[in-house]
Amino acid sequence: MTPIIKFCNVCGHGVDLRVPPDDHIERHVCGRCGHIQYLNPKVIVGVVPEAADGRILMCRRNIEPRLGLWTFPAGFMELGETSAEGAAREALEEAQAEVESLDLIAVINVPYVSQVYMIHRGRLLSDRYGTTPESSEVRLMREDEIPWDDIAFPTIWHSLKFFFEDRRLGQYSAHRLDLKFRPRPPQRAEVSGGNI
């Protein structure tokens, strides 16, 4: 592991990269107070917001990465919130949409970027939605209107596939997927394989 952290977040002294006693992985350890700083994966929460007529609320990204491509509301989980609360917050922040987050539909591990996605299905609570600094366009779409070739991330693409297949079957379940390898070029078609 390449050192990422330079200073202790407790006492401010420089840290060393070494394996602490009773551990097996190199960690950032303070040379003065002995505090160990852990680097852990980030949790991303998202929601597939469904309107009463069955259409899905989609957002065109107005920020990098993947500027101009499509997603449903998703982002980093914050401290002190559940995954469902975070997913609902993201819908408000990215699409001005009030959403009730329902069942978990996917847990997707993406170790090549050290992220774990927790995706919920959701119900739009009103007809109100709109653009934000994060989304240049926000639209309700039927499944056949989803711009599959312009989906921003593999996690979003797979989650939508899980959602629509479960809806066709009339039974929702929590899916697990491991995206172990970074997608190969062309970058626009960023849809990677599953458990490979």
Image: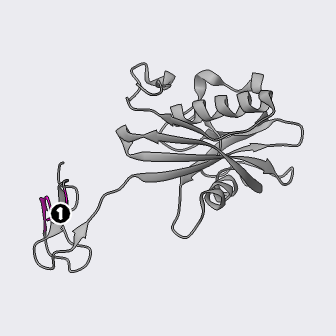
Mark 1 — residue? 22
- The spot of residue 192 in percent (x, y) is 46, 25
Which residue: 46% across, 41% down? Answer: 109
- The spot of residue 195 in percent (x, y) is 44, 28
User: Is residue 142 in view from this perspective?
Assistant: no
- The spot of residue 90 in percent (x, y) is 63, 55
Residue 18 highlighted magenta (yes or no):
yes
Q: Which residues are magenta?
A: 15-23
Q: Quadrant of residue 151?
A: top right
Residue 81 highlighted magenta (yes or no):
no
Q: Quadrant of residue 101?
A: bottom right
Helix, strand or loop under label 1: loop
Residues 187 and 35: in front is 35
Q: Is residue 145 above or below residue 129?
A: above
Residues 87 and 173: in front is 173
Given the current orientation, which residue lies at the most extreme right position? Answer: 53
Q: Is residue 155 left or right of residue 6?
A: right
Q: Is residue 13 left or right of residue 106?
A: left
- The spot of residue 184 in percent (x, y) is 39, 21
Scheme by which the image is coloured: one colour
Which residue: 73% across, 55% down? Answer: 96
Q: Mark 1 is on which residue type?
A: Asp
